[in-house]
Image (cartoon, rainbow, N blue to C red):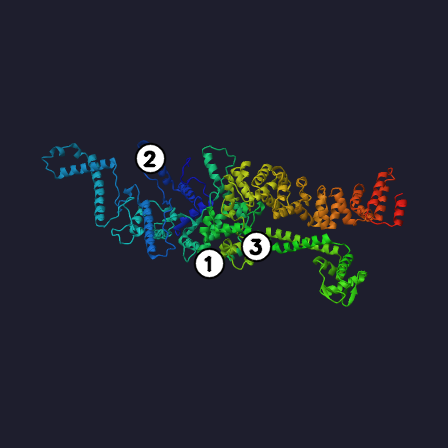
């Protein structure tokens, strides 16, 4: 086909399955009505024109030579005289095309007013008449009117110069013979004496001319007399042939019946045996197909063997308020239906643009020229050998919802067509495919036939019910995750609260805590005694009596009596202490053991949540759909209602036959996009801004591939504003510039949630985040600082959790630790809180994986948990300053220097040099040194004697500690201290 020709191509490659099936159907005398179905621009006309053009090469030899000669003669005439063709080629087919570019239709559905309904009915009937008129015109309005001499249609008759000359010669000879025979011989003697009358050759020629001319004249007179007897108001021509009767009140005529004899005569007189109707479905008037079928039956009654082929969309029989579904209607009307597999993706016409540009040499394409359909034909034998089969149980299941035999035959037939034109790699496990693909093809064909309107919308990129369902199912996935983990999250929050409170108030010796709480009760009474079960208790009671008191108190619902027998409630115990006391009295469990159990319970809940998340994100559409049905007694979501309102669709979804890859089975491109994905691609390609930080893409790899084909520049990718795109390149780690530009876009939009969502995606996939963190440090240097200085508590909490999860991963480098350290994120209160509630194993993992962070103040840890404080000290996550020394000393040794030096320092590997540098300042400020503390302090400075000379200044510092302490010493202690210990 020449460059720029806008007609459908007639030289395209016709897939083997189509050419073979059309050959079979055309030769079958029982097949008279064939449908070729597909949405617009799928290649129906191209396939048909190319097939019939190639079919001409299989005509008999004599016809092929004749057509070749006709072509040459016509070309000579056109070249020399610029005249129309002299002769028409011999063909057995004809295309009838009735365009409706402006969508002129008459819709009478849904009308309630009877007058309006009647008016619309008349308009519809007139439209049908116009369609019939157009079809008749294209069939009967032929330039070679002499081929139809018995036609009753009055048409313009043209006479060539040659025909006029022959007629003139005929009348000259006729006149000459009449004059010679009947004329006055005396007057025409000169005529009779001419020598030609005695010439035998002239006599033979003249007799032949007179005979032929008389025969033609006689035939003309006979046909003219026959027509005179008819009331023929029918006149041929684009304006004169009408369906209007002479009286306006008479109903509109059925033109196919009215011109039935003419149509019969037309097909008898010419070679046309196949008529292809195009674009009739554009009028949205299915009754015209019914009339054409009736016409076909009438034409074939005398054995004419005329076949009608209809090129149309599947939804043409989707008639509103019809008792029969569109698939059954379509199957009943046609003898066979051929579904055209689209020649290109329904939503991607890039290959067509490239091909047309190549025709003009406007681009240099490095793409290997491979015909998609030729590849499929080459795979047909391989597909047969692979033994790809539909599962019988699916056929039985679908059979519960579809019972029409013709419809079932058509569904299986169309499934085979699509199967033949899809790549083998989709079905072959050896090439990454799945045997279940053939079952998914079947599901899409069922959907295509049962819901043609929705399928047409899907194929045309419009809003469709099936796509809305697919896009909405992932939203339900997140809802389901929140619902499944909600109860566990509440328990985790409760445990975090209890753990934090217990660790902040925990006294490791429960006996001491019981004694303290009992003394508080005793001190609140006037006589400083309390009574339980007629037994009095005071501050001097031993531990056994204390245990007995608390046992009686719990048995008495935490009530006690004073000395005078007045009852009081025990109010100085919080819920955690109550739990500890009960466990200790009944089971001998200490506070530390309770704390450990709570932490273990919390860890189990967190692991359970992680498992739930993993399970939910692994769920397929069928599982999510079942979950939705189980959780909703009434279906209110329109996306899900589309499925539940149609039992066969519900069955297909529940069987897992309609999944996220559903578009793979209706388009030749395996990466064809959903409408939502295509919308994203268009936004990116048009450089339009996306303002939401959570534009999610289910199949981001397909979207990336499509964008790369359009424009893979950094300038374009700054508009690909989806966390899934950012996560994709963070995993690939080969397009750093794309990462940088997307992070920079988030920075300009001030949307830290965009980065957080990406981190959540990557953490969920357990992949390395170094590339992303490097990009953040480069393109949004203050990201962490900006987040943790904001007022969005939830954002800070979520980001802190994700960052801590990354820090606990040994596979991650320092790309995240160093920025957090530099921006002092570790000292942010929200970050500190999340660090404290972190499971102990993860906390230790962070200490082991990362270089230490020098916390200038460990009070937040000491207030939360003594055990966690010890971990911070062991792994040196603190600054050796006087603030931390005081916290460590008071928290772990309770101001007892001997205990601190003999147990804490050695156990936690605290530097004694650090102690020496800060202990004197501590006592200088606190002034609380006891005799034992001063002795221990003296021993500490005397440890230097073995190596260095003793520093007398340190003895003076010890003496100052003694002089300024607030503790009172008796004379004996002073004497021992000054004369012996400090001597």
Specify whether 187 is left or right of 943.
left
Q: Which residue is mark 1?
A: 403
Circle 3 packing at 10 Å, graded few (<14), some (14-19), many (20+), is some
Of labels 3 and 1, earlier in sequence is 1
**C-alpha distance separating marks 1 and 2:** 57 Å
Q: Could you tell whether 283 is left or right of 756 in the image?
A: left
Q: Which residue is mark 3?
A: 623
Q: Nearer the viewer, residue 516 or 843?
A: 516
Q: Nearer the viewer, mark 3 or mark 1?
A: 3
Depth order, front residue of 288/413: 288
Label of residue 73 in the image:
2
Q: Can residue 641 be seen in this snapshot?
A: yes
The spot of residue 288 in percent (x, y) is 36, 51
State the CA–CA distance, disc 3 to disc 1. Answer: 28 Å
**The quarter of the displayed image where residue 944 is located:** top right
Tell me how many marks there are.
3
Q: Is residue 476 left or right of residue 838?
A: left
Q: Let me know if residue 672 appears in the view.
A: no
């Amino acid at each position: 086909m020449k460059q720029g020709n806008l007609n459908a191509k007639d030289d395209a490659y016709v897939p083997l399955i189509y050419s073979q099936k059309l050959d079979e159907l055309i030769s079958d005398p029982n097949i008279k009505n064939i449908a070729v179905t597909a949405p617009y621009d799928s290649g129906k006309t191209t396939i048909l024109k190319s097939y019939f053009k190639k079919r001409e090469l299989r005509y008999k030899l004599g016809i092929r030579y004749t057509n070749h000669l006709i072509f040459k003669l016509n070309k000579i005439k056109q070249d020399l005289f610029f005249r129309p063709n002299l002769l028409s080629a011999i063909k057995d087919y004809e295309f009838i095309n009735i365009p409706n570019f402006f969508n002129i239709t008459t819709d009478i559905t849904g009308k309630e007013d009877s007058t309006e309904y009647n008016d619309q009915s008349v308009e519809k009937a007139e439209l049908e008449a116009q369609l019939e008129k157009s079809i008749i015109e294209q069939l009967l309005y032929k330039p070679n009117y002499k081929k139809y001499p018995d036609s009753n249609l009055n048409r313009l008759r043209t006479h060539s110069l040659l025909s006029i000359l022959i007629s003139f010669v005929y009348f000259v000879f006729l006149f000459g013979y009449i004059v010679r025979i009947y004329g006055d011989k005396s007057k025409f003697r000169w005529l009779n004496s001419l020598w030609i009358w005695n010439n035998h050759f002239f006599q033979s020629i003249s007799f032949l001319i007179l005979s032929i001319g008389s025969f033609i004249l006689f035939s003309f007179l006979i046909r003219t007399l026959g027509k005179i007897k008819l009331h023929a108001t029918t006149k041929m021509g684009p304006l004169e042939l009408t369906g209007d009767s002479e009286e306006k009140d008479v109903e509109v005529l059925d033109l196919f019946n009215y011109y039935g004899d003419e149509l019969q005569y037309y097909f008898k007189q010419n070679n046309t045996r196949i008529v292809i109707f195009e674009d009739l479905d554009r009028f949205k008037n299915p009754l015209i197909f019914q009339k054409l079928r009736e016409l076909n039956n009438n034409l074939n009654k005398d054995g004419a063997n005329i076949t009608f082929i209809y090129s149309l969309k599947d939804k043409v029989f989707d008639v509103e308020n019809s008792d029969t579904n569109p698939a059954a209607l379509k199957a009943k009307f046609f003898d066979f239906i051929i579904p055209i597999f689209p020649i290109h993706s329904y939503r991607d016409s890039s290959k067509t643009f490239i091909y047309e540009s190549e025709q003009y040499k406007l681009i240099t394409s490095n793409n290997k020229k491979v015909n998609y359909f030729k590849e499929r034909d080459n795979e047909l034998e391989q597909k047969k050998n692979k033994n790809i089969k539909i599962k019988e149980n699916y056929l039985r299941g679908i059979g519960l919802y579809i019972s029409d035999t013709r419809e079932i035959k058509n569904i299986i037939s169309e499934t085979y067509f699509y199967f033949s034109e899809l790549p083998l790699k989709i079905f072959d496990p050896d090439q990454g495919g799945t045997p279940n693909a053939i079952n998914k093809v079947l599901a899409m064909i069922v959907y295509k036939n049962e819901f043609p309107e929705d399928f047409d919308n899907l194929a045309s990129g419009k809003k469709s019910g099936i796509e809305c369902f697919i896009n909405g199912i992932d939203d339900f996935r997140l809802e389901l995750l929140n619902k499944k983990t909600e109860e566990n999250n509440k328990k985790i929050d409760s445990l975090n609260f209890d753990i934090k409170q217990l660790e902040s108030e925990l006294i490791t010796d429960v006996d001491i805590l019981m004694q303290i709480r009992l003394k508080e009760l005793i001190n609140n009474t006037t006589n400083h005694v309390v009574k339980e079960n007629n037994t009095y208790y005071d501050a001097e009671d031993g531990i056994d009596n204390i245990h007995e008191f608390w046992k009686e108190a719990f048995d008495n619902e935490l009530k006690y009596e004073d000395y005078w027998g007045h009852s009081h409630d025990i109010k100085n115990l919080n819920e955690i202490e109550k739990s500890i006391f009960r466990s200790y009295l009944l089971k001998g469990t200490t506070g530390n053991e309770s704390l450990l159990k709570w932490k273990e319970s919390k860890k189990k809940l967190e692991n359970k949540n992680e498992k739930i998340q993993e399970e939910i994100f692994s769920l397929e559409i069928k599982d999510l759909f079942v979950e939705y049905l189980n959780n909703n007694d009434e279906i209110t979501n329109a996306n899900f209602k589309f499925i539940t309102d149609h039992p066969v669709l519900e069955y297909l979804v529940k069987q897992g036959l309609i999944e996220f890859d559903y578009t793979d089975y209706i388009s030749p491109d395996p990466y064809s996009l959903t409408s939502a994905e295509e919308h994203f691609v268009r936004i990116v390609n048009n450089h339009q801004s996306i303002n939401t930080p959570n534009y999610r893409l289910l199949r981001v790899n397909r979207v990336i591939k499509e964008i790369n084909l359009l424009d893979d520049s950094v300038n374009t990718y700054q508009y690909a504003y989806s966390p899934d795109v950012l996560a994709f390149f963070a995993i690939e780690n080969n397009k750093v510039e794309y990462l940088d530009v997307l992070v920079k876009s988030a920075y300009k939009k001030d949307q830290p949630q965009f980065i957080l969502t990406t981190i959540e995606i990557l953490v969920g996939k357990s992949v390395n985040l170094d590339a992303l963190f490097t990009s953040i440090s480069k393109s949004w240097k203050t990201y962490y600082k900006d987040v943790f200085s904001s007022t969005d508590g939830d954002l800070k909490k979520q980001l802190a959790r994700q960052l801590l999860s990354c820090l606990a991963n040994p596979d991650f480098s320092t790309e995240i630790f160093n920025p957090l350290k530099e921006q002092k994120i570790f000292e942010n209160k929200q970050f500190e809180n999340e660090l404290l509630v972190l499971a102990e194993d993860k906390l230790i993992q962070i200490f082991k994986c990362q270089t230490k962070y020098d916390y200038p103040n460990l009070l937040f840890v000491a207030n939360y948990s003594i055990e966690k404080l010890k971990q911070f000290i062991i792994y040196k996550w603190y600054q050796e300053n006087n603030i931390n020394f005081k916290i460590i000393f008071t928290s772990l040794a309770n101001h007892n220097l001997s205990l601190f030096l003999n147990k804490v320092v050695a156990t936690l590997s605290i530097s004694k040099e650090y102690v020496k540098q800060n202990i004197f300042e501590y006592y200088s400020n606190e002034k609380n040194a006891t005799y034992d503390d001063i002795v221990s302090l003296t021993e500490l400075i005397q440890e230097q004697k073995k190596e260095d000379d003793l520093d007398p200044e340190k003895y003076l510092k010890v003496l100052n500690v003694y002089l300024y302490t607030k503790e009172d010493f008796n004379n004996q202690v002073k004497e021992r201290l000054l004369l012996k210990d400090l001597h």
